[in-house]
Amino acid sequence: MREVIVGLGACGIAAGGISVYDRFSEILDPQKDDARLKQTGCVGMCYREVLVEIIEDSGRGVLHTPEFQKQRTLYGDVTRERVDRIVEEHLRAGKVIEEWRVAEEHEVLAKQKRIVLRNCGKIDPFSIDAYLAVGGYQALAKALKELTPEQIIATIAESGLRGRGGAGFPTGTKWRLARAAKDEHKYVICNADEGDPGAFMDRSTLEGDPHSILEGMAIAAYAIAADQGYIYVRAEYPHAVRRLREAISQAEAKGYLGQNILGKGFNFSIRLKEGAGAFVCGEETALIASIEGKRGMPRVRPPFPVEAGLWGHPTCINNVETLANIPWIIMNGAKAFNIYGTENSKGTKVFALAGKVKRGGLVEVPMGITLNEVIYDIGGGTLTGGPFKAVQMGGPSGGCIPASLGNTPVDYEKITATGAIMGSGGMVVMDQGTCMVDVARFFLNFTQNESCGKCTFCRIGTKRMLEILERICVGKGEEKDLKNLAELGEQIKSSSLCGLGQTAPNPVLTTIRYFKEEYEAHIKDKKCPAKVCAALVDYYINPELCNGCLICIKSCESKAISGEKKKPQTIDPAKCMKCAKCITVCRQGAVEKR
């Protein structure tokens, strides 16, 4: 039986996937086409959504083998209008539409190793049977029937898996501490409060393979002797929430959650807690406070959550990506996992590749791969085709790594040495048209708004830093500002209570470290080299390109443009609001910034 599979992750839905799915549903005739319509999550190539996969028979073969390629065709940029042609030509006439096929698929996947994303884009996330068909819940059965809790923890420790939420704490060690805690009631929490701008790793995993998270949590609960779990997921992820609710219901019905799981006397249930979108609730003690119904604010540690967490009981918190690794490691063994990576950073890492990159989307690569390989070999380079300028890693808590350090391996310690952090996996690529001062201002504005206000240095210090950056961006910076930013940044890092404050200055400090000349141009020359900061840019009409069509005059609300028809126009800088509408409407490319 042939299959038509439509990508309905959040990226696919945003690109029009539901309309594409509905059109297939309207015109597919199972009697004539012998094709079943299915849905799946994000396959990772978000830049080509809506993605539609045609499977010629029910067997999928082995990825990247000739036999596999013969069995399947992946179409990209599918619209509702293209559906009819796919049905008529491909399904009914047996002819592949080459111009719509994702020809670069092998190139995108060649350097990836999919462990966390092993099922994303392959199975129906609403179907537990689809998960079971690819080996789902076998790891849980193995853990309960063949392994002791101590053996499970030893396996995770031997694998070298470190927490993928940002801190990189060894998962096996955390589980061992939680196991050792003396309490008859313990909790496992999945931290799905993904708040970094440009990050969507956890969201896509939850949408595409929710049962892998539930299975990972159940194994963790058995290992540490917990009986209750929570998934703390932000309410802004409605598709993930809906699929998680369905997955929990299905797992309970099949006996993989609830009482006496698989007849082994193990009880474990999971509840969802929808967060209100506070970035600080990604910090584990603030997250715990939120679940308890309190304001999400970090508390002093120790005691750590593994000693006294949710409602005072020992609590093991792991993020989505960490938990998704667990079933794979249990089934394949520690050595199968730690053959990937570096000495201190084992396995793979999922990144949300975004920004000025051609192939934006979700990638999972072995630790140790270089930034250049991710950006150029997988991401296809920048949109302009030129070299990238910097890459922001670790979100607003991370830093900007310059292109000169593009050969830096993806490794916790090596990334930290640059001044950035691995973080949860955001990777925002910037090109030569990016102003690094403006980037620092953007991220600091985010963290300043998201500060819970508990720490004076975080609450007030980030505000003072933001005020300095805003002055620099409008041409009112002073030479002492760079020294003040550096001093404030170090004080905030050393005096803040939680990770938000301790890392908030990173974007500023790294951009000063690697792009000091841009700050100096803003301060001394009152110019923005990237021509981004509006107050430091003048608009100019090139008389050699202007044909006097007057379109720019009609679009200028400030009446700053004047001139006669069929003759070059001019802009009065005193009247210009720098709204950039003239650049947008000019068909000749005559309006320039300088």
Image (tube, helix red, strand yellow):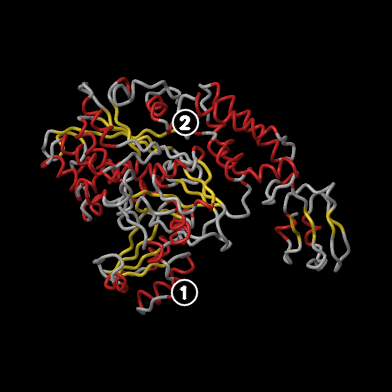
In the image, what residue occupies the spot 23% across and 31% down? 176
Sort mark 2 into few (<14), some (14-19) or many (20+) by Cα contacts within 10 Å.
many
Place residue 240 in its image quadrant: top left
Q: Is residue 550 left or right of residue 75?
A: right
Q: Residue at x 71, y 43 (%)?
A: 522
Give the vertical position of 451 relative to 440 (above or below).
above
- Which of 116 and 526 lies nearest the eye of the viewer? 526
Q: Along the polypeptide, which appears first: circle 2 or circle 1?
A: 1
Q: Secondary structure at mark 1?
A: helix
Disc 2 to disc 1, how far (Cα)?
46 Å
Q: Nearer the viewer, residue 21 or 446?
A: 446
Labelled disc at residue 99: 1
**Discs 2/1, front:** 2
Q: Which mark is residue 280?
A: 2
The quarter holding residue 591 reads bottom right
Answer left or right for 137 relative to 467.
left
Indicate the position of residue 537 as horizontal and vertical percent values.
75, 49
Q: Amino acid at mark 1?
A: Glu
Name the spot of residue 303 as percent of width and height, x first: 34, 20
Q: Amino acid at mark 2?
A: Val
The picture places residue 207, in percent across and down from the top left corner, at 37, 48
Whether residue 12 is visible here, answered yes or no, is yes
Outermost residue on the right side: it is: 564
Q: Is residue 512 above or below residue 102?
A: above
Q: Is residue 581 left or right of residue 336?
A: right
Nearer-the-camera pick, 107 or 253? 107
Question: How many residues crowd mark 1 within 10 Å: few (<14), some (14–19), many (20+)?
Answer: few
Q: Does 73 sit left or right of 386 as displayed?
A: left
Q: Of the numbered discs in the image, which one, if any, rests on residue 313?
A: none
Could you say which is closer to the camera, residue 572 or residue 30?
572
Residue 31 visible here: no
Q: Mark 2: which secondary structure?
A: helix
